Image (spheres, grey):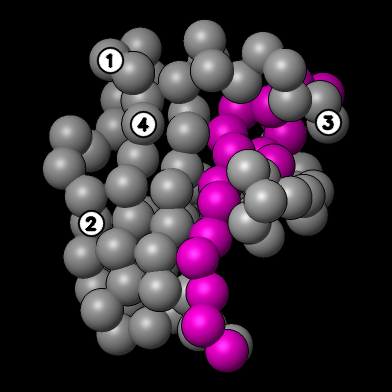
Amino acid sequence: MLHPGVRLTIDGGGVVAAPTSALDGASEVAGYLAGVLSASAARLRVASVNGAPGVVVCVQGRATGVLALRTRGRLILEAWLVVNPDKLTTWTC
């Protein structure tokens, strides 16, 4: 599902540990997202994120991440993951 040149930008806001620069390439992006999205307590909910397809990551009834995707056909070209809790207050699980 990931384009070989996919790019993931993560916003931890300096509050949550996150890479400070974008991750590039399917292997790097897949590895990072697998860790975030497969956390044992995480539930995922498909949602529209700023008009784009996306996923809300929920842990114990609270949004801990929001992932927005830019796709072409069946491939994800670019993704943005917000894990900064200050920016997740309006998201529900």
Q: Residue at x 35, y 12 (%)?
A: 15
Mark 2 / mark 4, whichever is N-terminal: 4
Q: Is residue 38 visible?
A: no
What residue is disc 1 on? 14
What residue is disc 3 on? 93
Residue type at mark 4 is: Asp
Residue type at mark 2 is: Leu
Tag 2's secondary structure?
A: strand
Q: Quadrant of residue 27?
A: bottom left
Mark 2 / mark 1, whichever is N-terminal: 1
Mark 2 / mark 3, whichever is N-terminal: 2
What residue is disc 4 on? 11
Distance between mark 2 and mark 1 Cα atoms: 17 Å
What residue is disc 2 on? 23
Q: On the rendered structure, is 47 left or right of 36?
A: right
Distance between mark 4 and mark 3 Cα atoms: 20 Å
